[in-house]
Image (spheres, grey):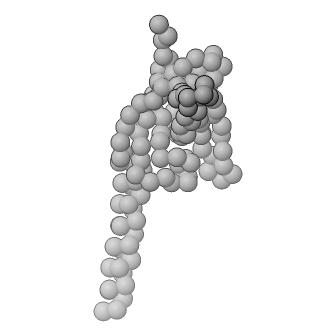
Amino acid sequence: MFKKILLWLLFIAIAGTTLFFTFVIYVNYSEGKRAGEVIKLSQKGVLFKTYEGQLNTGGFSEGDGDITSSIWHFSVRKSDKEVLQAIDDAIDGGYRVKMYYHEKYVKLFFLGDTKYFVYKVERVVET
């Protein structure tokens, strides 16, 4: 009887953990887009390599002419080679981009340093 209860508890724990990680990895909390100039993209980590970046979305004047910038931190999956190339081109070209992203419920260290994962990048055409 005790073994049966223990096996059921083990099964429930494994199933619950599997469902939790599946939910966290594949379900998005929100999605959106931000525009700005990419100022950094780096590969970080010792065991789990992740791509982390920063986007300068602009700033606002504080009255005395000083502009406070707004830096947005984002992550990119290693498998998104097209996105990584577009970000690299934006850094080299120094032009503004629009980034489309998914926000996850929680941050998982083996996926990235942020909850924001960029999946598409477009060049912003200045008029």
Residue lying farthest front?
A: 64
The relative height of residue 105 versus residue 59 in the rendered view (above or below) is below
The relative height of residue 113 versus residue 58 in the rendered view (above or below) is below
User: In the picture provided, is 119 more to the left or to the right than 75?
Assistant: left
Residue depicted at 58% across the width and 33% down the height: 68
Residue lying farthest bottom?
A: 1
- Residues 92 and 58: in front is 58
User: In the picture provided, is 73 more to the left or to the right than 34?
Assistant: right
Q: Is residue 78 visible?
A: no
Occupied quadrant, residue 33: top left
The relative height of residue 38 versus residue 125 in the rendered view (above or below) is below
- Residues 4 and 33: in front is 33
The relative height of residue 97 versus residue 15 in the rendered view (above or below) is above
Residue lying farthest top?
A: 127
Give residue 61's position: percent from left, percent from top: 54, 28
Residue depicted at 55% across the width and 31% down the height: 62
- Residues 95 and 111: in front is 95
Occupied quadrant, residue 53: top right
